[in-house]
Amino acid sequence: MKRLVPRFSYLCATALLALAPLVAVVATDMSKTVRVAFPVDVTGFDPQASNDLYSGHVNNAVFDVMFEYDYYVRPVRLRGSIADGLPQISADGLTWTIRIKKGQHFADDPVFKGKKRELTADDLVYSWKRMLDPKLISPTLWHIEGKLVGADALVAEAKKSGKFDYDKPLEGLKALDRYTVQMKLVRPDYVLAELMSQYNWSPVAREVIDAYKDPGNRVMSNPVGVGPYRIKEWKKGSKIVLTKNENFRDELFLTEGEAEDAEILARNKGKKIPLVGNVEISVIEEANPRLLAFKSGVLDYESVGPDMISNVVQGGKLLPEYAERGIRHQRAYDPALGYDFFNLEDPVVGGRTLDKIALRRAIIMAFPMEDYVRVSWRGQAEPATQIIPPTQTGYRANKRIDIRQDVALANALLDHFGYKDADGDGFRDLPDGKPLEITRSTTPNPRDRETDELWKKTFDALKIKIKFNAQKWPDLLKQARAGQVQFWQLGWNSSATDGNSFVQLLYSKNIGQSNFARLRDEQYDKLYEQAQLLPLGPKRWALYATMNDIAIVNSAFANGVFRYQNLLTQPWLLNFKRIPFRNHFWHFLDTDESKRPK
């Protein structure tokens, strides 16, 4: 019966919409602006070269995606966006055929010499080959590496010659005609369609890349896409303004959803997307100013961080000063893992000998996880019991780990493996007598400073010297990818429903991309590769469980959390509905300006 309810709701909404009277097509309202804030700056706008969360929000809007989640349909399902429907997949799972919608054009750019540039299947072939280009060092190489027939040989040639041959035919990736792409896979891939819902598969124009590329073949500051918006203004560290891409395809508002969304679907029937002509994104790093901007009506919705949640919600209820104004609150798990990682290639904290594992394990044991959740997260997170969060398939609900702080046992472990004070300065040294000092990277925001205080107390209790490398988040991200940070905290979000996006964080071939811990474990890699051959289900997820145990044994990650997201939306924001696998669907949002404070 439970399976019938969402389908019944969906049918009701569709039926109600069908009864609505026909209306004339309504163009985008260019006088309207949706206003939001990011807590950190973006790093750049090259779909195949960027992979941070906040750049991704903009990339989704500027470049569009092959498939996106049907915004009002539950359970969630994919629909074609750039693609004209879902992939056609052969019975053996090895041949994928994808058609794109006709009449899609890139935003205007001088490289097109005043002509409208239509998106073609050749653009997709070129863009997806970019992920394979060794010079680009795509952070999402793992999406496509080893999957296409003939691709490994092409990549090997590029590594040998120093240049990727984009014009060389590839059996596993070809344009069948102007609007059809065919992929031939080495093996079936059971998560590929969901991966293709991410902007990393979004098309770029070769002329744009050739005109603006840097020495690494990346174009991070001149985005030209086929999405509903284009960048009108970008002030680094301050503001990003999007405006409608005048060349965006003619597409009307959605027509399918649940019964509760029938009024939204009926009200927007016949309206072109995007509904709102502009999106203004302010970079406001401090949580208090962001919340004040929301309270004053400057922001249309806001994800309230743990440091400010007590000012908004108490006892699980929205405070009267918000509720009485019609502000709405939603709280749910993010499809995300927050984790601290050690660089396993670092000469001090890295390595897989017992003494090195003991050092990392002692640090983990001495950290006050309960205080961390209470102080740094204000109770808006749960200690992570595994790599995969509870929002994804493959999560083990019965998995338990001991998170209790045990400083005495941690110190005993360090003593046993020879981490003693060799020079009499009151701090431990390495077993060979050399100085022991650990550098934790951090950002200068208040929440990180609170966490830094907990880590300082942890290291003091272990009698280990610690110093902090405080820099802006985009700079630290570049260092982490290059293996230049020793110990840092990151968060990983996924727009897919399966836990594969999380277990790949420790796959050795993803070092330099998403494997920031730089773990190299043959057994882990073998299990990961075996999992890719299995359909989603218990056998695949059992391999995930073993991989998780290997990560724990190596102490690659420390003190992870599954975090909650608390969303506030203004009463004048229309059409908003939360989808756990993607935060922003600006092209479907609207505003009622009569309710916005003047």
Image: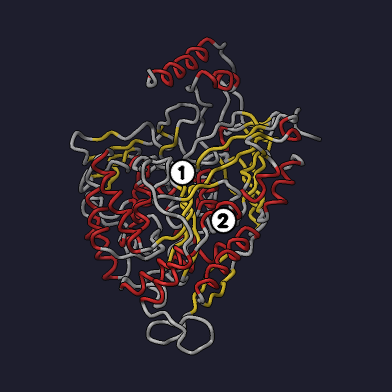
The reply to whether residue 208 is visible in this rendering is no
Q: Position of residue 240 (x, y in %)?
A: 63, 51
Q: Amino acid at mark 2?
A: Asp
Q: Position of residue 159 (x, y in %)?
A: 29, 68
Q: Is residue 572 left or right of residue 354?
A: right
Number of labels in the image equals: 2
Viewer-side residue, 526 vs 265: 526
Q: Position of residue 153 (x, y in %)?
A: 22, 60
Q: Position of residue 283 (x, y in %)?
A: 65, 53
Q: Which image quadrant: the C terminus?
A: top right
The reply to whether residue 360 is visible in this rendering is yes
Q: What is the residue that sits farthest to the right in this orientation?
A: 598
Q: What is the residue that sits farthest to the left in this orientation?
A: 92
Viewer-side residue, 236 vs 170: 236
Q: Which image quadrant: the N terminus?
A: top left
From the image, tell me which residue sits under label 1.
Answer: 335
Q: Is residue 326 above or below residue 358?
A: above
Secondary structure of the residue carrying numbered label 2: helix
Q: Is residue 321 above or below residue 175?
A: above
Q: Is residue 254 above or below residue 354?
A: above
Viewer-side residue, 426 vs 285: 426
> Of discs 2 and 1, which sits in the foreground?
2
Q: Amino acid at mark 1?
A: Pro
Q: Quadrant of residue 365?
A: bottom left
Residue beneath the point at 71% across and 42% down: 294
From the image, tell me which residue sits under label 2.
Answer: 371
| Disc 2/disc 1 C-alpha distance (Å) | 23 Å
